[in-house]
Image: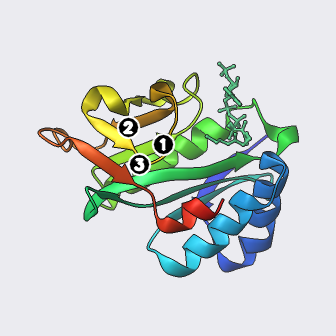
Amino acid sequence: MLIKIRSEKEEDFAQVYRINSLAFESEGEAKLVENLRKSVPHISLVAEADGKIVGHIFFSPMTFENEKTDFLGLAPMAVLPEFQNRGIGSKLVREGLKTASEKGFTAVFVLGHPEYYPRFGFETAKTKGFSCEYEVPDEVFMVLELEKDALKDKKGLVKYRPEFAEV
Ligand SMILES: CC(C)(COP(=O)(O)OP(=O)(O)OC[C@H]1O[C@@H](n2cnc3c(N)ncnc32)[C@H](O)[C@@H]1OP(=O)(O)O)[C@@H](O)C(=O)NCCC(=O)NCCS
């Protein structure tokens, strides 16, 4: 199976909606992507398997202590259930982090599976001094520095876009 990771195009929007709905078994994340696409600069990549879109990853800006930053939040990310566990999610994360770095973003936060994201270099955000606006176990809120020392001497609250609160 040939997997290609590329930027999302307008003609992919319906497929991306479907992938998020099926992977999360609800339309919350699919609607979130639609809302964020309209309102913020973002990175949105899709995975194509033999020409068919089977995965999606999205990054949106985060604030630090309510100020603008070069930090991104990775969310949501989804792979069609029948295509999971074949490395497609990993390819999306790696390509997404590379794109974020090339665009000058300095760190990426994620709220997700603590068994999954450390393989890409994510660490518990709390140990780096960052707290999350949501009440979640420490280990599920993680961060990865894209630029050396981007997080140095910074401690405080990082927040997702307000659209996330609607999910
Ligand atoms: C999470 C997700 C995007 C991973 O995509 P994928 O293509 O299956 O990922 P990969 O094939 O690169 O990696 C598979 C690994 O992810 C792990 N994984 C998948 N879902 C997981 C979960 N819910 N909790 C913990 N680990 C999970 C698998 O156990 C596997 O681990 P292994 O490599 O140690 O065997 C996909 O499972 C998905 O769409 N899940 C539903 C939506 C979701 O939970 N999105 C992420 C929100 S943080």
Indicate left or right for 89 with 96 as reference: right
Kindly state the secondary structure of the residue where label 1 is placed. strand
Which residue is most to the left? 153
Tell me how far mark 2 sits from mark 1, CA to CA: 6 Å
Which residue corresponds to mark 3? 98
Q: Which is more toward the observer, 160 or 133?
A: 133
Q: Is residue 98 visible?
A: yes
The dot on residue 143 is 2
Which residue corresponds to mark 1? 110
Q: N-terminal of the two: label 3 or label 1?
A: 3
Name the spot of residue 3 as percent of width and height, x first: 70, 46
Q: N-terminal of the two: label 2 or label 1?
A: 1
Tell me the amino acid under the disc marked 2: Val
Name the spot of residue 150 as percent of width and height, x first: 19, 44
Tell me how far mark 3 sits from mark 2, CA to CA: 15 Å
Quadrant, the C terminus? bottom right
